[in-house]
Image: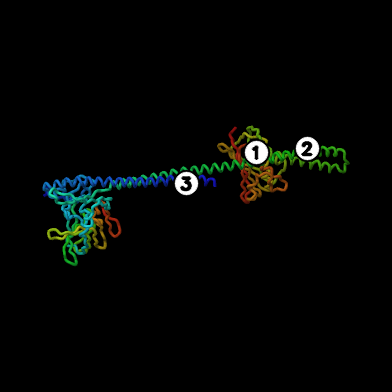
Amino acid sequence: MKRLLVPVIVACLVAAVPAPASRELGKQSAPFYNVDTEKQVEGTIRELLFEPRYQDKAPFLILVIEEKKTGEVYRAEISPAWFFDYDLHKGESVRVVGSTYAKDDSQYLIARRLQCGGETFFLRDSRGFPSWRGGQMKRMGRHRGRGM
Amino acid sequence: MRGKGLLLFFFSPFIGILAIFFIFSTLNRSFIQNKSESLVREQLTATAEIFKINLAHLLDEGYAPEDILGLYEGEKNIYYFAILDERKNILAWSSRYEGYLPFSSLDSGRTEPWILSSPLGRISNRLSPFNRRDGKLYYLYLGYSLRSLDEMSARSRRYSLLMFLFLGAVGIVFFWGVFELQKKYLAKTEEAEEAHREKERYREISAFTSAVAHEIKNPLNSLSLLLELLHGNVHSDIKDEVALGKAELQKIARIIDSFSGSLRPLRPVKETISLREIVADAHDALLREAPKPGVEWRYSESRPVFLKVDRNLLIQCFLNVLRNAYEATDRGTVAVEVEARRKKVVVRVIDTGRGIEPDRLPRVFDPFFTTKDKGMGVGLYLARKIVEAHEGRIGVESPPGRGTTFTIQLPGGGHE
């Protein structure tokens, strides 16, 4: 049992540590932030997940959101887990602005701005540049975030 | 006014030089920036051309666009790039930043490079077409970082500003120094001119007075001799009147001697002598002249002081100052305090008398200035002349209701 436990802990720690800024261009399989497909989704959090999204990068926080008006479900990509330190809960109402795309009959969203509990998080700039890579994340008018 | 003129004379060209430096520096930086941006554009074009040749070749070889992406890595200034089909749909893309590929439908019509701002600096973007061997059209989209260029420009701006501030500070310090020197020089010149004018005036007065004294004293002497003769021969009833006339003539002669003596230049014959002795001699002479029983006399010194001075002149000086103190004090104290410092002696003649009116204080050392009925206004003037002839200084203070203090500073004052 102990033999299994040690590699699992190490793997978890490695996943939790922010990935260093790569100096090389990585092959991207995920869709990019496309301003042409930007929309606002207002709904309720159904699930919170951590998923790897980009090659050689830390796992991302994913919110499964059910849109209030249409009942459509979006998987919203928020930011690397290490960057987002605000507590979100299932059932919480959120408003997300981001770039949408469809894949395998599911709707996806790359979030640029997230509003919940009276606070606003700027996750990317207007062209999709990630705040955790040098931008600033603002919440309620205050600067926040640990961008590299 | 002359100081202001000098300031403007030097300062205006300096401001001009600074302005020219600023303009030249700004133009130079702008030129270098334009040139660098042009070089970057050329480099981006060259890189894109190489990329396109390689991509066309690999596509000809049958590689799928997404498989080709992994082969291009290591160009540190390229933030992102993408391969687009003939309708400008993105087939494959690669970016250094998660999900960041700032290409939109608005950009698809562009033929010239364009620049985007990002939190990491400006990015030069370029969309250019290339063909596969079979003629199929593709597009290459490249994002090239201008961060190094921006950093270089910022550094250049910083250095220029620092240089500008440095030059400004140096210039201000330099010209402030020049201005201060000029001010001091002008003040000294003014003083010297004033002293020269004063000397010239007194030289003329002295010459005039000596001539007048000489002209008056000759007939006075004759008159005096005549009265002497008369005194021996006149009737006893008028002998007293003749004697009184002779005494009055002698008084006139003394007054004339005093005037001409005070205006004559002093040539001290110096010898080393105790200051206590000089002050005591002056004080004794004064008391013999006019005893003042109601006034207490005090003398104190921090240590015995010996000065190289003209004994007679200095006795005269202290006699005059002490006379002034005694005459101003009906009841109280006249004190002399001697303080020996490193290279000078400070003597304070302090009285508890009626003091001097503040408006009269600046004139007490002027010749022929007096507030007394019987005085001629020569005593303190002569005291100042004697002190100055010994390279010393004399000053006076008279706070209302607290008597008067004359302060005499004389060089020297070592032990013996």
Chain assignment, label 2: B
Instruction: Pinpoint residue A92: horizontal percent, then vertical percent.
Output: 21, 63
Q: Residue furthest bottom?
A: A69
- Label 2: which residue? B218
Q: How many marks?
A: 3
Q: Alpha-carbon neighbours of circle 1 within 10 Å: few (<14), some, or many (≥20)?
A: many
Image x and y of residue B66, in percent: 14, 50
Q: CA distance from mark 3 to mark 2?
A: 67 Å
Residue type, mark 2 in image:
Asn
- Work out whether mark 2 precedes mark 1 in sequence or the reverse, and give the earlier one: 2
Residue located beneath label 1 in the image = B386
Say left or right for B172 vs B389: left
State the residue at coordinates (25%, 50%).
B124
Instruction: Look at mark 3 in the image and give the residue it sits on.
Output: B12
Q: How is the image coloured?
A: rainbow
Secondary structure at numbered mark 3: helix
Which is more toward the observer, B202 or B234? B202
User: Is residue A5 in view from this perspective?
Assistant: no
Three-letter amino acid code at disc 1? Ile
Circle nearer the N terminus (3, 2): 3
Quadrant in which residue B324 is drawn:
top right
Which dot, 1 or 3, sits closer to the camera?
3
- Mark 2 and mark 1: span between their CA atoms? 29 Å
Of badges 3 and 2, nearer the viewer stands: 3
N-terminal of the pair, mark 1 or mark 3, is: 3
Say whether residue B225 is visible. yes
Q: Is B344 situated above or below A71?
A: above
Q: Nearest the camera: B119 or A44?
A: B119
Residue B1 lies, in percent from the top left, at 54, 47
